Image: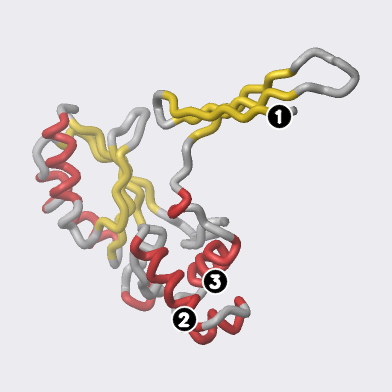
Amino acid sequence: MLTFISGNFPEKQRLLVISFSLPQNLPRQTVFFSFQQVNMQNVLDPIDLEILRLLQKDATLNNKELAFKLNKSIATVHERIRRLKEQGYIQRIVAILDRKKINRNLIAFSHVFLKAHTAETLIEFETEVAKFSEVMECFQMTGAYDFILRIATSDMDAYHLFLRNKLATLPNVSTVQSFFVLSETKSDTAYPL
């Protein structure tokens, strides 16, 4: 005999209790299972994952090419890509350029320490730094520094001008420590799925 009991509990958890009797008059057994409630609309199936894998490697693939690779209809692929965009899995589709061909030969990772750490100060720094075209990425960090910036410029002179005329002029910047890339072993944009 099986008995199923389920219910909603705090923190979006659901408890499923399965109670069963074993043959030969063994005592009744009760097993408790707790699991996080999952929004089934945001669960990726194997086809979604394969679409994401393929597009991460080559975003120029059109729906017809994807449909052929997946053995699915063009309409199915189109609808899945639309849904993946709506749900935020695909944020944007861009071309990845060879930075050296566009004269962005110098990459620096700059650690920035701020004088103050109020919410307003952090937001102000993030807002201002996002305006600088030289800043390719900005991460708020734990540890000795508050932020790490990935900066792309044409050369050391251009970086020096950026540091003196833009980054160092921001209010509350206390220290900037920069590290320059000598060579690039790996630069991948595709996340493993």
Tell which of 100 and 186 is nearer to you: 186
Q: What type is the residue that disc 2 sits on?
A: Ala
Q: Which residue is mark 2?
A: 75
Q: Which mark is residue 2?
A: 1
Q: What type is the residue that disc 1 sits on?
A: Leu
Q: Secondary structure at mark 1?
A: strand
Name the quadrant of the N terminus. Answer: top right
Q: Looking at the image, is mark 2 or mark 1 earlier in the sequence?
A: 1
Q: Secondary structure at mark 3?
A: helix
Judged by depth in the image, the label closer to the viewer, 2 or 1, is: 1
Left or right: residue 128 versus residue 113 is left
Q: What type is the residue that disc 3 sits on?
A: Leu
Distance between the Cα atoms at labels 3 and 2?
A: 17 Å
Kindly indicate the quadrant of the structure image that contains residue 28. Answer: top right
Q: Which residue is mark 3?
A: 54
Q: Secondary structure at mark 2?
A: helix
Looking at the image, the residue that sits furthest to the right is: 24
Left or right: residue 108 versus residue 190 is left
Instruction: Please say if 149 is above or below 59.
Output: above
